[in-house]
Image: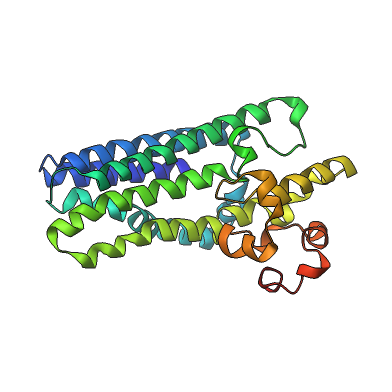
Amino acid sequence: MGDIIRLNYIIVFVMTLVLNGSGNVRGIVLTILVCISRAFLGGFLLFRVLTRKGDGRFDEARENPCKFLIFWVFQILWVFLIASPVIYVNGSGSDPDLGAVDYLGFAIVALGTIFQVVADLQKYSFRADRKNKGKVCDVGVWSISRHPNYFGEVTIWWGAFVVAVPSIQDQNEYWALWTVVSPIFTMFLLLFVSGIPLAEGKKLSRFMKTPESKSEFLEYFSSTPPLIPFVPFLYKLLPTWFKCFFCCEFPMYAHSELKEQILPGDQKGSPAAMA
């Protein structure tokens, strides 16, 4: 299902670029970058679904016709909102000379794509080794973020918005700054809806089947941020309220068996504990 959504992105990007017909260099470069990221992610998700013979995240939706219909209707809005910076750049007709802001945006998109690709490949390689069954993936970029692939996704759309800013300024169409909804909506989905909440919380039970695996996971969970990469030993030293407000470490991500250990007695009255 995810691979089809990524194909929709590519179709939208290419169509808006071709239909405009302006030869917009900014739009061409941005379209190529985001299409590379969507093509990889769509292909990888398709490969994973085929090898796993399904996607557990959407099995319940498939079994419920109403939920399935709602998902497909929602994806129309989903694709439009997230793709909005690219749609604006490709369709605005504005083509000011490329400047520092553009190159910064391109670099951010490229960084996000690299992070996403490396994260997915590293985790696939980790899971392919039977010796790692039941263990948490803490290798490579997964050692500095519990969800580096999601960090890559968010970074891509912040970069796309940055690239759109020069075109918005050139056209004096500051109303188009609403396209910042793209990275914000992406963060909302991954932090509260279809990303981390579906991977953590009660889903963490698989890492706590033995005292050893539970201890290893608790150490990983307490020293590794959920999204934004950070140095593990420094992250572990941060107060709970700081992790919650600045590192997106929301209490709902913790498994019920871990909360008592993750939230010491002197921190249970903190904003994080009360969220």
Q: Residue furthest right?
A: 211
Decide if residue 51 is in sight here.
no
81 vs 185, left or right, is left
Could you say which quadrant of the image residue 248 lies in?
Answer: bottom right
Could you say which quadrant of the image residue 132 lies in?
Answer: top right
Q: Position of residue 215 (x, y in %)?
A: 84, 45
Q: Residue at x 80, y 69 (%)?
A: 266
Rendered position, 206 above or below 270: above
Q: Residue at x 67, y 31 (%)?
A: 127
Q: Position of residue 238 (x, y in %)?
A: 67, 57
23 vs 237, left or right, is left
116 vs 179, left or right, is right
State the residue in front, 264 or 19: 264
184 vs 246, left or right, is left
Q: Residue at x 55, y 30 (%)?
A: 121
Q: Position of residue 26 (x, y in %)?
A: 20, 42
Decide if residue 133 is in sight here.
yes
Could you say which quadrant of the image residue 243 lies in?
Answer: bottom right
Q: Position of residue 184 (x, y in %)?
A: 42, 60
Q: Residue at x 72, y 58 (%)?
A: 254
